[in-house]
Image (cartoon, rainbow, N blue to C red):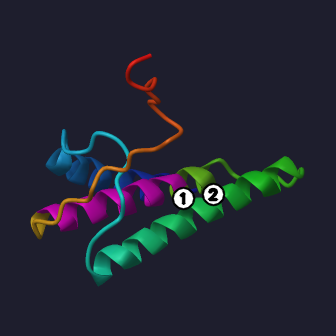
Amino acid sequence: MFEEQIQWLAGYFDQYQKEIQGQLHGFVLPRGGRPVQLLHSCRSLSKKAVRSLVKVDAHGIDVPGELPRFGNMLCNLFFRLTVVINRRLGIVEPEYQSLSYNLKPPSGK
């Protein structure tokens, strides 16, 4: 159903992924101008749509597999676009240091 559109998105994803390859090493805090803010909002809404589709499917209503794939591809593409736009403008998002991941023992112990 959506396979052509998914492949179209995948082509753009690959193109932008190559442009930023090696530049991301974990989570980043969103930064940037209005276009980047809007893309982050689109990304968030795409995630919500995918989560909703999973819930609908879990309640016994059949959801075609292409729909969550399409939503996930949009989500991933929107994120790559934010990084590409920021890099082209010289904006580097600060890395987010999660307290939940990569915990190191306190020094001296």
Q: Report whether residue 20 is seen.
A: yes
Query: Hey, what amino acid is under mark 2?
Result: Val
The answer to whether residue 45 is above or below residue 97 is below
61 lies left or right of 67: right
Horizontal and vertical percent position of residue 55: 79, 54
| Disc 2 target residue | 50
| Disc 1 target residue | 71
Image quadrant for the C terminus?
Answer: top left
7 lies left or right of 100: left
- Secondary structure predominantly adopted by residues drawn in magenta: helix
Tell me if label 1 and label 2 are in contact, CB under 8 Å.
yes
Q: Secondary structure at mark 1?
A: helix
Q: What residue occupies the far front of the structure in this picture?
A: 108
Q: What residue occupies the far right of the structure in this picture?
A: 60
Relative depth, front residue between 9 and 97: 97
Query: Hey, what amino acid is under mark 1?
Result: Gly
Horizontal and vertical percent position of residue 60: 89, 50
Instruction: Specify start and end residues of the magenta stretch as a single range.
Output: 72-87
Q: Give the residue displayed 50% in from the left and 42% down from the top.
A: 99
